Image: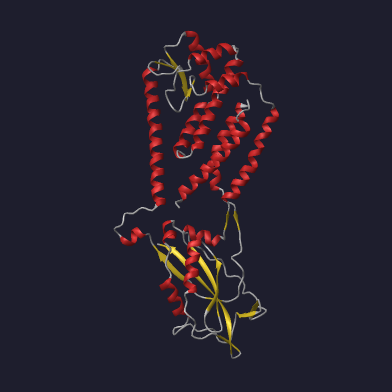
Amino acid sequence: MNPLLIYMVKSALCISVFYIVYATMLSRDTMYGRNRVFILVSVISAIILPFITIETSKSVGTLFFGKMLSEVLITGSSSASETGMSFAIGWPHLILVIYITGVLLFITRLIFNLGRLYLLIKKNREAETNIIRFRGLNTAGFSAVNYIFINSGLSGKDAEEVLRHENKHLEHFHSYDILFMEIIKSLQWFNPFIYLFDRSLRAVHEYQADEGCLKSGMPVLSYQQLLMNQIFKARAFTFTNSFSNPTLIKKRMIMMTKKRSRMLANLKILMVMPVIAVLLIAFSSCKDKQQSKEAAGEEIVSPPPPPPPPPPSSKYEVANGDTTWVVVDEMPVFREGGIETLLKFLRDNTNYPEKAKEEDIQGRVVVNFVVKTDGSIDQVKILKGVDPELDAEALRVVKSLPAFEKPGIEKGRPVAVWFNVPITFALK
């Protein structure tokens, strides 16, 4: 699958998990500053965590002695490039096209709204002030960036209280949070949890602004009455903090009179640490470094050759009562041409799996097998795997090898002999 899609799915998973933690553990607390930081840090962490991959090394497989044959290289290309005339698009590419289309639509909408806001400022701004009075928008007032927008139809007292409320938004730089979330929503438009996080962040903004207004001395009942007077108003822009957001008024009125949370409630935030640990484990990879570079198409620089290993203590291995040899007086003979004929057979009969080509999977598979005393092939197994599709094809072709014309000979008698063959699947 396309790396961009994989990254976005991982990021969406992080956002979903963090939102569940927030909704179940923190959302009912009155520690608005902490909740705001948690939401923003959660979204930022969801952007970063998919890039963090904990690589754990693993052994190549069970160590077998045996003759290592030369590498068999199998190349492949997508079906579209093979035909030269096919315009068929695989499902991963179709999903990528749909995703990018959605991103472009959401970004276009954001740019359009920013343009509307700019025109509103340019049309209604008076002198050197950050207060913009407007007509025609169905809202009491809102704030964006460094400006406060007030409906010119409000009475003097109501306008003063709305102005005080929106000024609290500016003091806390809430507009930058909203703009950041709008950008993330454009990238995560398919993820329902980002919309829930966005709504929660807007609610926290309103709670903070309400709290600031009430601390300045405004009676709770008067403030609630002002909110009720604006209950049927609607927001003018999606990326602004609006005083008269009807979907939040009930919650805001509840939070105004709610008992303050204790400081010990901050300890709840520690619950996110095991969540992050689980996500990192889920994103971790367990593979050897050479395989990672092959899959990424990077050039592999061979390290300096290690000192030659000591000779095996035995020229054969005994397992389950059967003796399989590693070094014999006369190695098995495949056909006329020997090992080169065997490698040619593998090259000619190995097919690059279509699914692996579509998903751009490549790598080096090492297959281990035994040539028995009658020359037949037995105990075929994967010594080093890459992907189920590639592994299955490598196993299939090795199992299809015809019998060797001559088995291995040790001291004049036929014996079973180990072989290893590397089959590399590479896309051009």
Q: Which residue occupies the extreme bottom position in the image?
A: 412
Residue 321 location (% of width, % of height):
66, 79
Q: Which residue occupies the extreme right position in the image?
A: 264
What residue is rendered at 38% in x and 37% in y? Answer: 105
Q: Nearer the viewer, residue 75 or 120?
A: 75
Q: Which residue occupies the extreme left position in the image?
A: 85
Q: Quadrant of residue 254?
A: top right
What residue is rendered at 44% in x and 37% in y? Answer: 186
Q: Quadrant of the C terminus?
A: bottom left
Residue 220 location (% of width, % of height):
59, 13
In this rendering, does residue 155 appear at all? yes
Depicted 156 relative to depicted 208: above or below: above
Depicted 36 relative to depicted 45: above or below: above
Depicted 47 relative to depicted 294: above or below: above
Q: Nearer the viewer, residue 41 or 350?
A: 350
242 relative position to 56: left or right = left
Coloring scheme of the render? Answer: secondary structure
What residue is rendered at 47% in x and 74% in y? Answer: 400
Figure label count: 0
Q: Nearer the viewer, residue 360 or 145?
A: 360
Q: Quadrant of residue 355?
A: bottom left
Residue 285 location (% of width, % of height):
57, 54
In this rendering, does residue 147 appear at all? no
